[in-house]
Image: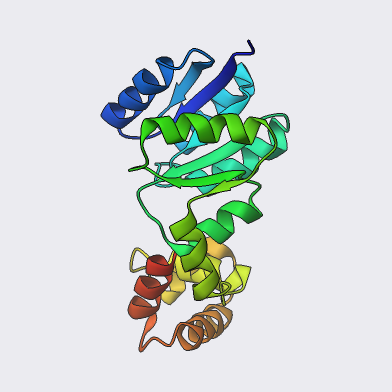
Amino acid sequence: MRVIRVMLAEDQGMVRGALASLLGLEPDIEVVGEAATGPEALAVAERVRPDIALLDIEMPGMDGITAAGEIRRRVPECQVMILTTFGRPGYLRRAMEAGAAAFLVKDSPARELAAAIRRVLGGERVIDPGLAAAALSAGPNPLSPREREVLGAAVDGSTISDIADRLHLSEGTVRNYLSSAIQKTAARNRIEAVQKAQLQGWL
């Protein structure tokens, strides 16, 4: 019997511990590494080179979707699965673009998670059916990568000048990108544009 080596990345210690315990009950699954942040997930994946990396989306330092893309690049033999509380349509699309092989919600039964791990190792793509339907009905992310970057920089309430300095852009360029993002999200201002984009998982 082949033992599937799994790495867990989840910032909440209690959740991570519970997942490790549940997966440890499976005879063919071994948890070989754990991480609490995005950068730590990369370091652990490179060190232990697991068969499967199970990542949460909301992590300090680097979100799980960005980490998924980096792990796929640095440890290509490792398959990445996203396990999240946030079933936002835009997250699913971004996760697939980053090379994730599975996207599941955390309230799935442990038995289903173990079965999904085996299916992914067998070459299948596993997506929560409800999320898949929501993503199809929501359509693609209307924001360009630059608009996403500028809007993302506005999340903390930074001024136009702050955003321009941080992204090495002119203030006029920042205003243009924000204006375009506001229009595409059908928002009244950039605060509302940020909220709408976050709700859809576009940021």
- Residue at coordinates 65% horizontally, 30% vertically from top-left? 121
Location of residue 53 by image quarter: top right
- Residue at coordinates 62% horizontally, 36% vertically from top-left? 120
Front residue of 2/199: it is 2
x, y percent for residue 50? 61, 22
Can residue 202 be seen here?
A: no
x, y percent for residue 88? 42, 61
Q: Is residue 108 above or below residue 140?
A: above
- Residue at coordinates 51% horizontally, 25% vertically from top-left? 7
Quadrant housing the N terminus: top right
Location of residue 79 by image quarter: top right
x, y percent for residue 13? 30, 27
Residue at the extreme left of the image, as rendered: 14
Front residue of 162/200: it is 200
Q: Is residue 50 above or below residue 112?
A: above
Q: Is residue 36 above or below residue 92?
A: above
Front residue of 154/13: it is 13
Q: Is residue 54 above or below residue 100?
A: above
x, y percent for residue 180? 53, 85
Can residue 85 be seen here?
A: yes
- Residue at coordinates 70% horizontally, 33% vertically from top-left? 74
